[in-house]
Image (cartoon, grey):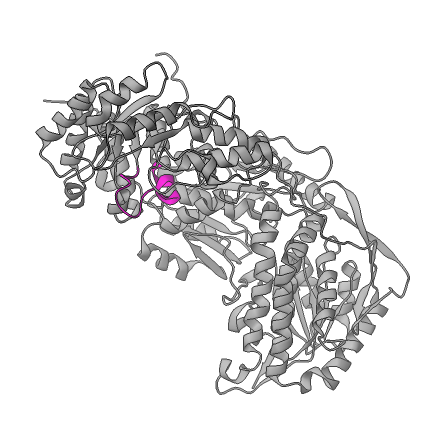
Amino acid sequence: MIRIKSKDLLPDFKFSPAVDQVGIEERTARFQTRSIKSETKVVGLKKVLNMIDLTTLEGKDTPGKVKQMCYKAQHLHDSIPDLPSTAAVCVYPSMVSLAKAELIGSGVKVASVSTAFPSGQAPMEVKIGDTKFAVDQGADEIDMVISRGRFHTGDYNFVFDEIAAIKEACGKARLKVILETGELGTLDKVRRASDIAMYAGADFIKTSTGKISVAATMPVTLVMLEAIKDYYYKTGIMIGMKPAGGISKAKLALHYLVMVRETLGDAWLTNEWFRFGASSLANDVLMQLVKQETGAYQSADYFSID
Amino acid sequence: MAKKKQIEVDLNSGWAYAPAPESKGHIKIKPQYNQFIGGKFVKPSNGKYFDTINPANSEKLSSIALGNAKDVDKAVRAARKAYSEVWSKLSGKERGKYIFRIARLIQERAREFSVIESLDGGKTIRESRDVDVPLAANHFFYYAGWADKLEYAFPNKRPTSLGVAGQIIPWNFPLLMAAWKIAPALAAGNTVVLKPAETTSLTALKLAELIKDSGLPDGVVNIVTGFGDTGAAIVNHPDVNKVAFTGSTGVGKIIQRAIAGTNKKCTLELGGKAANIIFEDASINQAVEGIVNGIYFNQGHVCCAGSRLFVQESVYEEVIRKLKDRMNTLIVGDPMDKNTDIGAINSKEQLDIINKYIKIGQQEGAEFYQPACKLPQKGNWCPPTLFTNVSQSSRITQEEIFGPVLAVQTFRTVDEVIAKANNTPYGLSAGIWTDKGAKIFNMTTKMRAGVVWANTYNKFDPTSPFGGYKESGFGREGGLHGLSAYLNLN
């Protein structure tokens, strides 16, 4: 007879904890009433810069574009001394080796999307191949998408097994699992998908591909942060969080930090555990930092777009 | 086996918020305030004044007229005169115009009112700015709309006004309670003599200035200031037709005795010891937020505060752990700082009462918890407080504390928690947290409480009636029910 201890069993994901949407929205509104001033603001803005995964994920990406972005990741605005670099650049697998070469010695990580990003509608072998290719090219981090179609049909085992297989293919690379919350429909499903991803081996859970209209929102992110906290309490394992898409203003980014601080605590306020997936956020943060220093807002033309 | 490392999150250090004080430069507080009688600010007949104190630093803000029975008599005469000569003769449409004007003026001067409310009462600027003042304006807006529609509000009745309403309000929501009382009274066609609580007279007197600016006919609203005996003079005045009181159950009983045998109408909104009930199928994270809003909102100075927490035993540990986490993120301190979650206790007297109950709780053997927080040197402060392992028979579960002190009990079945929740002389409000709709409806029919919130707590709206069962009082404020309390319906 096989004896299985109940503590070793996976939870039944159909019974992920319920989420109350009204309550979540109220709580996120409350985070936005926090007033972030002076030194707190400067420290916070620099943290934000250091948490950005500077991203280009377009069909028209070229080595030229990626090279420029890699330079920007290391030199955000050289006229301000002591600025951090971004956490990572995020590119398609075909650009990984180039980005890796450009970023040598900088400490900026290379993240690659994979698993037939953004739709994830490809056979498992293709997805594993896609992932292995990116890792072989030198990717430090893999951003995969879950199979939302299978998730909606209730095939949670498939979604779980797929994440676990990709995790295996990642080797030493850290795995970020994109839930594409804009396609999940309810916060209860966001919670369920978060639980599946964490138990299947995600190092990070991530909201969105940035390819559909509703990307990261504070309510969705809060649900995921709460899932991370519950998982941490249960296992002692920290999981990272990455809201992606739709965060382009410094003020909003600071409110995300407030939300992380008051939900998971200061330990998560580093780029090891929290990232912003964003392409235009950096410049708004830079503009705010310059304003803190000089007292005046500068024209957007003073900040490089790439 | 080696002792397992406790897994916890640190919510209290690292990136901390710099002070974000609301500016006070734009407000004016006069060194002395007189009473508002017959459209004029008049000195108290005995020439005496008392101090009003900022509870956050114990500094004097201003002197307030100490009204006595003579002043009250003057105010009631002014109200009677305004009633019979002007206000009762105006059409509902004209009355409505004045009330709308008051509502708009409150909105225009919202910042000023918020700042003074926080200075005088100790509540956080976040709450006075986001809750008290906008809600006060909304009450005037709402009742302004009813003023010319009374026949439609009560079909087949002939609604007529009562006359002079004597109104006595508490210190926990000074401006908001004034709005709850004045707006329906005026809409129904009555005139008013109102007394604010002695520790928080300022916004009522500022409201008097605003009412004067609005051009409301003299004597329609009169405001007298002072202590309990001033209030007693209003209750006992023979020419008052209606008494409306919000405050303690003790005083409510005195008032009822005093008006027994008269034909004064009466509504009382008194104390509470509300049950906030968390079922195992609730959204626990949001329920924790609701517990915090239920008991720590306005320093727990809320008659409908969810001061008795009932947690189903299967989720007890999770709830308490998360509640303690959340308590660690609460910022206690300067009410004028926009980031403060819990402000100053309204008065030294109230702080003494709260501390007395905290001592009782500890003596009763309950487990005591307060998060580590730095409190300012001066002023009246009480950190958010949690008592677990309390019994139904503990004094801290039976008596109203009116402070940020939560008593937690566990339960096993629905029947058990209903019985325990109703086992109190109070019955003002209750909270229920479950993901199951059927459970909510079952519970709401069985809770003997005037307001039952489901999956939320401390939500107020002018359209929604508010009031209690049993020793929490009678009569309703807000909505049509609140309007009918100021009308004869024949």
Q: Give percent across and percent down for residue B34.
A: 82, 62
Q: Main secondary structure of the magenta part?
A: loop
Point 67% across, 38% down: residue: B381
Q: Give percent across and percent down for residue B422.
A: 48, 54
Q: Quadrant of the C terminus of chain A?
A: top left
- Which residues, given as a range, are shown in magenta? A207-224
Q: Nearer the viewer, residue A94 or B338?
A: A94
Q: Give percent across and percent down for residue B129.
A: 60, 52
Residue A9: in sight, yes or no?
Answer: no
Q: Quadrant of the N terminus of chain A?
A: top left
Q: Quadrant of residue A102?
A: top left
Q: Quadrant of residue B332?
A: top right
- B133 sits to left or right of B61: left
Residue A59: in sight, yes or no?
Answer: yes
Point 50% across, 21% down: residue: A82
Magenta residue check for A211: yes
Q: Nearer the viewer, residue A32 or B131?
A: A32
Q: Give percent across and percent down for residue B22.
A: 65, 45
Q: Is residue B206 above or below residue A242?
A: below
